[in-house]
Amino acid sequence: MNQTNPMLWVALFVLLCALGFVLRQLKALTVRLNLAYSTPFGRWTLLMVAGLIAILGSGGLIAHFDLASVCLSWPFCLPDQWFPLSPFQWVNMAHRFLVLMIGVAWLFYWQRAFTTYREKTSIVVPATIVTVLYLSQAMLGKQLVEGFPTYLVVLHQVTFLGIWIAAIVLTIGVGRAGLVLEDEVLRMQSNRWQWSALKDFLLLTKPIVVALLLVTTYAGMVVGGQRFPSLSLTFWTLIGGFLAAGGAGAVNQYLDREDDQKMQRTQKRPIPAGRLTPAQGLAFGVGISLLSFYLMVAKVNLLAAILSLVGFFYYVVIYSLWLKKATPQNIVIGGGAGAIPPLVGWAAATGSLQLSALFLFGVIFMWTPPHFWALALVRRSDYARAGVPMLPVVRGEEETRRQIFVYTVELVGLTLLLPLFGLGGVFTLIGSILLGLWLLSAAWKVWKKEGNKVAWKMYRYSSMYLAFLFLVLMVDAVM
């Protein structure tokens, strides 16, 4: 491997010729499809695509000639020297340098797209996807150099395919957007990045809801591992969980933007209030959700990453797109989305799932209806205006109050069974009884008394109940 392979130089020459040919064909294709790239941003888009082609070619050379085997350290080929010695190592270093430079360029490109063309979904969303997938691809490449499992190789290839699909969509979106130089200059002057927007992006993640989900995630880690997890594992699992849940919340707000304008509780959210565009909200949600998956794969494990992706799909597709306006049982079935985080934590700590973990899922699944129906009682008129068939809107307040008590009884009964299935012992049983009596008292008052005051207390108390219950499980697990 220390001698230069003549075929390598031939391949490099062929690669350069192929790159020139592809670029000429792309130019001809833009004419046939009536795509225009007359502005600086449009030409920048084509340049970024050319950079991806160059990376594809250099990466293909490394894979074909098995050049990765001569550069098994990161970021430099030789850990004790600053400069590689052999031509093969130079090719590896050139590829890595190219990846770095184009990655930085994509970050700047994304920032320009996200601000200058903030309302154009066909530009903002694919630009975000390409950027996130590109950075994730580089992260996977680092892991592969360090000798990670074979499934990363497959994910590495699938990710590159995803980058190309998003890049093609972006290129077509920019070409068909009808960009005009004068308009672009005005946009650059008026649509500048505002740091105050960071607060709005945080609000898109529904941070209060996510905070409770992270409590259940960490509890799943402690209960599953029967000990406190390491700081590193805790950090990456909770960061991944925050991004996944926050991304789902952001996409949900994008989907509900028209309904949110009709509801007093939600009309001041960033998208309906006009502080962020729908395109920005969707791009942000999809982007951080993708980033969550790749961080979990690289820093936690594949099972935890898949479960977090399932949670995103459940909340966005099954609940938001399908169930929410289809049935008054939307919260009952959709509660499964919020019940997945403890499974993520369990899988992060153990690398597997057991039957006991499903009881944590069941607890949150049963907790969700009485918790959310209490809020729906308070905001009944909001949901009626938005056309959302929540239980109080469809079956009335009296039936909803009765169902809150019924589900609370079933929830407390389920928690009393936890010690029988290996989740805690006497401490958990006592805690479940005391917390259960507290929640049953609140649910009884909701059933027997009318008014929003008792329903609002039930909503607040149920949130505290879940946090305290999982705290009891954690304490019992490490005792």
Image (cartoon, rainbow, N blue to C red):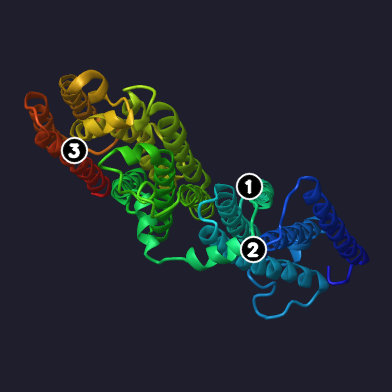
Percent from the top left, x then y, of residue 472? 21, 44
Assess whether mark 1 and mark 3 are in contact (beta carbons under 8 angstroms): no
Nearer to me, 70 or 40:
40
Residue at 22% x, 38% y is 425
Q: Which residue is mark 1?
A: 155
Q: Which amino acid, mark 3?
A: Tyr
Q: Secondary structure at mark 3?
A: helix
Q: Earlier in the sequence, mark 3 or mark 1?
A: 1
Q: Earlier in the sequence, mark 1 or mark 2?
A: 1
* Amino acid at dot 2: Leu
x, y percentage for residue 155?
63, 47
Query: Label 2, on which residue?
Result: 181
Q: Amino acid at mark 1?
A: Leu
* Residue at the spot of label 3: 459
- Which mark is first along the chain, 2 or 3? 2
**Image quarter in which the N terminus is found:** bottom right
Quadrant for residue 216, please give it. Answer: top left
